[in-house]
Image: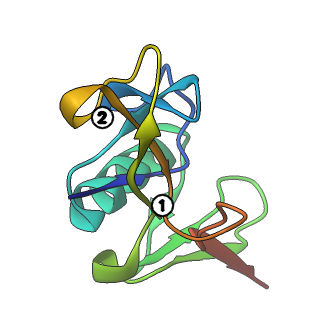
Amino acid sequence: MRRFLCGVPGDSCTGTLLTVNKDGQRMHATPQEAFACFKMYLIRRGYKQVGAREFAAPESGQITLLTRPSKFGTPLRLGKQGEAGTGIDGKRWTYLRKGGAGCIAEVAS
């Protein structure tokens, strides 16, 4: 079972609040849900959608290209038993890959 982080600040994210490495973060069940959350976040910030994955910044017009919906977000997995784990059987969520980085967006000029 995996979950995905979208990269949106917690107060603007539509995901479920769960524990990731002892921190409360919002996460999504699929990469497509994480993509939709980030897309709506950009639109709320004034970005204009110019393509399926391309968004133009409100002031500069710089293009932000999002990762494909099927590959979007930072993948998580169930980790070790935690004191306050919110996963299955009290386990906590942790990053699938070491370092925890996932490619969300790329800015093109």
Mark 2 crowdedness (10 Å alpha carbons): few <14, some 14-19, many ≥20: some
Quadrant hosting residue 106: bottom right
Q: Earlier in the sequence, mark 2 or mark 1?
A: 2
Q: Is residue 27 above or below residue 24?
A: below
Residue 52 seen anywhere in this rendered image of the structure: no
Residue at (73, 72) in percent of width and height: 62
Place of residue 52 in the rendered image (x, y in percent of width and height, measured from the top left):
32, 81
Q: Quadrant of the N terminus?
A: bottom left
Residue at (23, 65) in percent of width and height: 32
Cα distance, mark 2 to mark 1?
23 Å
Amino acid type assigned to the residue bearing label 1 in the image:
Lys
In the picture of the structure, the residue carrying the numbered disc 2 is 15
Secondary structure of residue under mark 2: loop
Q: Which residue is the extreme one toward the front?
A: 81
Closer to viewer: mark 2 or mark 1: 2
Q: Nearer the viewer, residue 62 or 9?
A: 9
Residue at (73, 64) in percent of width and height: 99
Quadrant hosting residue 107: bottom right
Badge number at residue 48: 1
Place of residue 78 in the rendered image (x, y in percent of width and height, measured from the top left):
36, 49
Instruction: Give left or right: position of 36 versus 68.
Output: left
Amino acid type assigned to the residue bearing label 2 in the image:
Gly
Badge number at residue 22: none
Q: Nearer the viewer, residue 63 or 94?
A: 94
Q: Quadrant of the C terminus?
A: bottom right
Place of residue 51 in the rendered image (x, y in percent of width and height, measured from the top left):
38, 82
Mark 1 crowdedness (10 Å alpha carbons): few <14, some 14-19, many ≥20: some
Q: How many marks?
A: 2
Instruction: Give left or right: position of 82 versus 104.
Output: left
Residue 47 seen anywhere in this rendered image of the structure: yes
